[in-house]
Image (cartoon, helix red, strand yellow):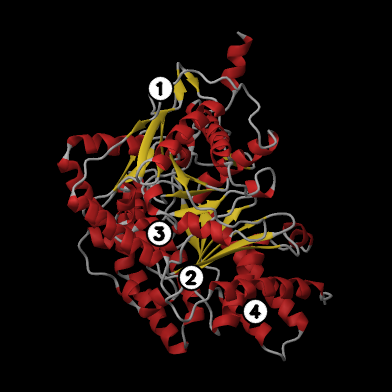
Amino acid sequence: MENQLAKSTEERTFQYQDSLPSLPVPSLEESLKKYLESVKPFANEEEYKNTEAIVRKFQNGIGEKLQQKLLQRAKGKRNWLEEWWLNVAYLDVRIPSQLNVNFGGPTSHIEHYWPPKEGTQLERGSISLWHNLNYWQLIRKEKLAVEKIGNTPLDMNQFRMLFSTCKIPGITRDSIINYFRTESEGHSPSHLAVLCRGRVFVFDVMHEGYLMTAPEIQRQLTYIQKKCHSEPDGPGVAALTTEERTRWAKAREYLISLNPENLTMLEKIQSSLLVFCLDDDSPHATPEDYSQVSAKILSGDPTVRWGDKSYNLISFSNGVFGSNCDHAPFDAMVMVKICYYIDESIIKNEGRWKGSEKVRDIPVPEELVFTVDEKVLNDISQAKAQYFKQASDLQLVVYAFTSFGKKLTKKKQLHPDTFIQLALQLAYYRLHGRPGCCYETAMTRLFYHGRTETVRPCTVEAVSWCQSMQNPSTSLLERQHMMLEAFAKHNKMMKDCSTGKGFDRHLLGLSLIAKEEGLPVPELFTDPLFSRSGGGGNFVLSTSLVGYLRVQGVMVPMVHNGYGFFYHIRDDRFVVSCSAWKSCPETDAEKLVQQVFHAFHDMMQLMETPHL
C-alpha cells in the first residue's frame, strides 16, 4: 500500500496539460505600439510617418474587426495559434525542408570520454542508442520530470513528438503523423530504422518484453554494417526526402503505386522510434571548433538521413555523433533535453557499457527493399543533385569563445543571453554599416501547447548604442549608459514575449483572419517597412539561444542575404554557430563571428569603466 501511495504522489510528465492556461490574445493597441517601435531603426522620418498613418488607419478600421474575430476564435480554442503556426511556418512551406527548415547539432561527447576515434562507431552507437531508449521509456511511463519556471509547470506536449513521429509530404500541404503513445494510452511502436549506404533496415528494440542491452543492439548494428560493406549500395530512397515538398509528394505517390509493399515499408520508417544513420564520414571536431561536424550533420549524405523524421541520430565513422530533426513537430529545446540526458549518462558510466555482456538469441534486422524503377531512380538522382547544389553553398562555422562566459557576465549583473544578442547587433552593425533586423526565439510554454514568439533585438536603444560605439567622440560613460539601456529594453521584451505579450504572432493571426474571411490584404502587411523590419519571415539575423547546457544547435539563414546564429552559454564559454550562403557576396559567417568575439571583449571592457 505504501508503494502505491508513493507512486500516486509522483508527478507524471503530462499531468498538468489539462490545467495549463490558454494562449492569450494581446491587446491590439499594445501590439501596434510595439510594432511601430520595432520598425523605427529601419525608416527615415518620412517613411516612419507614413507607417504611423497606416498603423493608425488599421487600428481604427479593419484591425479592430479582425481583432474581434480573433478573440472569437480564441474562445473556442485553448491555443488559437497552434494549427495556424504549424501550417504557415512548416506544413505549407514548399521549399526543400531538410536543408532549409530542419535543425541539427553535434553532441559534446568528444569533450570527455568519446574523442574522435576510428573503430568505435558501433560500440559507441549502441551505448548512445541504449540511453536514448531509456529516455523513450521515461516518456512512455510518464516519468520524465515536468519542466517548471519556479513552481509553474511548462507545457510538455512537444516531448510526445520526439519519438515515432514523421512528416508526410502533401501536394499543397504536408501533415505530421505521431504514432507515440504513453503506456497508459496503449501500444506504441518499438522498432528502430537504420540507414546505411543507401539501404534501410528495421529491428525491434524490445525482446521478450525487455529492452535490448547495448551489446544486443551492437550485434544488430554489426549485422547491418557488415552486410552493407560487403554488398552493393542500395538505391538511397531516403534522398527523396530532401526534395522540394510537392515533388517529393508526387514521387512518394508514384513509389506507392509501383507496389503496395512500398507503402508498408514507408510506414515502418515513419513509425520507427528514430532513424539511426550509419554515416561513413569522419568529420573533424574539437571542443573549440565544431564547424566541420556541424556542416556534415546539416548537409551530409542524403541517403543516410530521413529528412522528414523528427529524430535522426547520426553516427559517424570516427565515433562522433549528432542529430538532424524536422522542425515541424517540436522546437530545439526537446532535443537539448535528451542530448543533455545522454551526455550525462555517458559521463556517469565513463563512456562504457556497464551492464551484462550476455547477448540473447534475437532475430536479425529486417531489410526494407523498395520496389523501384527507372523513374524512381531518376527522381532519386535529381533529388541528390538539387540537394548537393544547395549544400555546397552553405558556409557554417561553430566556434567556442573561451575568454569568459556566464560567470563573468552574471558577476557584472548582465543577462548572458542579452549580452550575446547585443554583441551580435554591434558585430552586424560594424560589418555591414547598418542595423540588422533580427529574430530571437522566446518560449511560450507557460501556455497550453505554447511554442514560440518573436523577440526583435534590433531596438532603437540597441542601434543608438551601436552608433555610439562607432563614434569616437562618445565618452566611455555614455557608451556604458546606452548599453545598459539597450540591456534593459531587451530584458523587458523577452519577458513580455514569454508571457504572451509579444506582437509578431498576434499580427500573423490578424493577417490570417483577413485571409480566411476573403478580405484584401491590409496595407499594414504590404507596407515596405513591414518586410524591411523582418515581418513575413524576412529577418536578416535568425537567432536562438540553445540553452545553458553542453548542447549546440545549427540552422541555415532565414533569407538569402542573412545569417543563422545559434549559441549556448556555459560558465566559462559561449559556443556560437553561424551560417550564411556562399553565393551571397555580402555575407560572411566567419567574419561575423570574429566581430561578435571582438564585441564580447569591447562590452566587457565597457563594464570595467567606473560608474558615474
In the image, is 447 to the left or to the right of 592? left
Q: Residues within 10 Å of mark 2 (few under 14, many from 20)?
A: many
* Location of residue 194 (image quadrant): top left
Viewer-nearest residue: 69 or 109: 109
SS for dot 3: helix
Disc on the earlier residue, 2 or 1: 1
Disc on the earlier residue, 2 or 3: 3
SS for dot 2: strand
SS for dot 4: helix
What amino acid does circle 1 point to?
Pro
Work out how far the residue at label 2 is from the one at label 1, CA to CA, in angstroms.
Answer: 46 Å
Can you say whether 474 is above or below 77 in the image? below
In the image, is 542 to the left or to the right of 63? right
Work out how far the residue at label 2 is from the one at label 3, CA to CA, in angstroms.
Answer: 13 Å
Hey, which residue is sitting farthest front in the picture? 230
**Given contact means CB atoms under 8 Å apart, are the residues at marks 1 and 4 in contact?**
no
| Residue 501 in view in this figure | no
What amino acid does circle 4 point to?
Trp
Viewer-nearest residue: 551 or 384: 384
Q: Residues within 10 Å of mark 4 (few under 14, many from 20)?
A: many
Q: Which mark is residue 363?
A: 1
Disc on the earlier residue, 1 or 3: 3
Q: Which mark is residue 580?
A: 2
What amino acid does circle 3 point to?
Leu
SS for dot 1: loop
> What residue sits right under mark 4 in the picture?
465
Q: Which mark is residue 99?
A: 3
Can you say whether 515 is above or below 344 in the image? below
